[in-house]
Image (spheres, rainbow, N blue to C red):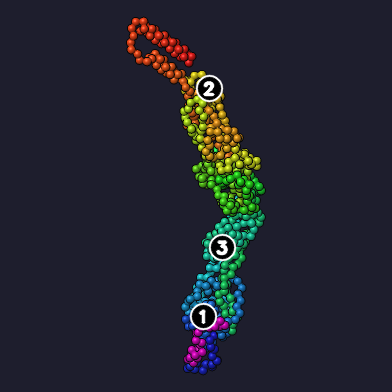
Amino acid sequence: MFTQWMPAQWRRRSIAALITLLTLTLLLALIITPTPSHADSSSLTPSTEKERISFIYNEGIFYQGLVGTDANGKRYYCIEAGKRVDHSIGQSTTIKDSESARRMAWILSQYHDVDAKTHAAISILVQDQFGKMQNDWDNHRVALEEQHSDVVEKAQEIWDESEGKVPGDAQVTFTENQSSNSGVVEVLVTDYDNNPLPGVKFTVTLIGPARFIQNGETTFSGVSGVESQPLMWEASGEGEIKADIAYEHGQVLEMDSAQDLLALADVSMKGGTSATFDVGSRFRPSLSTEVMPKVVDAGSPIVDEVTSGLEGGEWEPGLKLYASGYYFDGLSASDLASEIVPSDGESVDAFLGRLAAEGYVPVAYGDAFFDGPNQTVQAQAVTEFGGSELYKGAQESGFGTWVWAFESAKQDEDAKPYLIEDWVSGFLTASETNIIRRQVKVSSEVTETSVEVGAALSDTIVVSGFPEGHGSFTGNEDYEFGADEPYAQVSVWWTGDSDNPANNEAYEPSGPTVPNEDEHHRKVAQWRLPAANGTYVVGTGLLDADGKKMSVRAEEHGWYVFVWSFAGDDRVQAVSSRYDDPLERVRVMELGPESEDEEIEETVQKTVAGPKQLGKTGSGVLLVTGIGVAVLSVGAIMLAAIKRRSL
């Protein structure tokens, strides 16, 4: 209620005088009432007839409703009945927090763009709850009840409506989960009758070694519901944790002016009921691994033996942890001097990112599960996490190494809180590093596949598959890798029957490997060549790796076979050309007995035939005939002797 104009006291002499007085009062009120206009920052914009009602008290006209509005749109109501208002803006202070103050703040926030009667009803409530001139207000209220009973009733309806609409308290309670390192705090906001109140903004803050799972932060803000709201937390350390809660509530302010006024203030956060609890011990698991075996042939699966350990704390009984493995290969011998270890507190993602920046990216993965320390499993490298397709060492894999980790982010929800932080092994740790042995290919072809005894023999050999610079790796004792074998060998074998050329076919080379030496199998030459890729010609007099002249001749009939072989080392598999390769053998023939017989027989026939002559008679014919018979006899004897000698 505020006074716009107060007339002088008149004596009641007659009804006519009273009517005259009322008429003059109304006219003067219309003249004196300020015209609404835009106020500056030092004054309020006065209300209009649409925002207030009038009533008569003690022969004066008074207004009940909105007094004015400031430049920010804040609405002001009177709390000093009977005083005149000048709409000036003075100092503001927040009215002491109480249920009435919160209910009034709720009303002012709910009812703003309303009609004159509603503004009047609100102003009645303002005076009822916060009025300073109680006696004056009591009298004014009686007049209002007589003249505007509907407005007074509306005021009561609005006040009743505000009951149960404002928070009286907020509680945060601790509910322990199955794990002592994680759990739930429940938030409930209630009204002044301790009933759940939805729609109230709140903020919970964890003080101590814990964070909320929903956002990974120590604070969480939300809005209350009709039931308690669970917030999951996980420990980030050990010790006491306190959960503080603050909730939002409305408040009102009082402004000092010619007539003190009340308005809606900014919302405030009020502390609620906190909870305190302890988190149990967490632990730091670890892993140790041993590649099985250290040397793996290309095309074979990669296997690692992984053992769980404990670096600190106690493993929660029955708690299952997931270990993730990352396998890298394509490394060179020079990389063995570049072991990289994780920094203190470095996460797995950060460590892998650092390796990637150095050019090291995993090509395969491994999985293992443990529910306690000192457990060992064999993990095979697969092409993707959780997959079944085995990853196998390739020709170009070179050196390979594992990185194993316990990653907090990959654990089950009930296990995450137990890990103090990620645990990750180093890169190129000796026990986790292996080598993939390459496969070498060799092909060769003799210069001639058939020669006579005494001919020179030669072979052209093509070798591929050795790693670049093979022969230069001197080994690494720390990693238990042996040095390169620098040489391959070329051997020449004879096989056949020295006494019977016709029996050589029985000893034609067969089988992939060279035979044991005996009377029918002999190694007739051997040279050393570099164990490296290239094309090598042997048997033509070139020098071998030891400076020896590589030449060989077919000393006797039979078969001669060239065999290239490499004994193998930790980087390259053993390999040999086949003993029975038809392209690597030479058939050696000598001038056989059949050829000599044919020449003698041809000579004898020519001798017997002689020059063509005319026929003779008598003793001359007999003489010629006798000579011919003699010659044939001698020839037959010689032929028989030659054949006998050849047997």
Tell me if mark 1 has few (under 14), some (14-19) or many (20+) residues whose alpha carbon lies within 10 angstroms of its own: many
Question: Residue visible at 61% across and 79% down?
Answer: 91
Instruction: Give residue 470's position: percent from left, percent from top.
Output: 58, 41
Mark 2: few/some/many CA within 10 Å (<14, 14-19, 20+): some
The residue that disc 2 covers is 520
In the image, 255: left or right of 583?
right
The mark closer to the camera, 1 or 3, is 3
Q: Position of residue 500 (x, y in %)?
A: 49, 19
N-terminal of the two: label 1 or label 3? 1
Q: Is residue 524 above or below residue 397?
A: above
Disc 3, SS = strand
| Residue type marked 3 | Ser
Which residue reaches farthest top? Answer: 619
1 or 2: tag closer to the N-terminus: 1
Question: For mark 1, what is the residue?
Answer: 65
**Segment colored magenta:** 22-43
The kind of residue on which mark 2 rests is: His
- Residue 395 is one of the magenta-drawn residues: no
Residue 306: x and y, percent?
60, 42
Label 3 belongs to which residue? 221
Q: Position of residue 635 (x, y in %)?
A: 43, 12
Residue appearing at x 52%, y 92% in the figure: 12
Mark 1–mark 2 distance (CA, rounded to whole Å)? 131 Å
The amino acid marked with disc number 1 is Gly
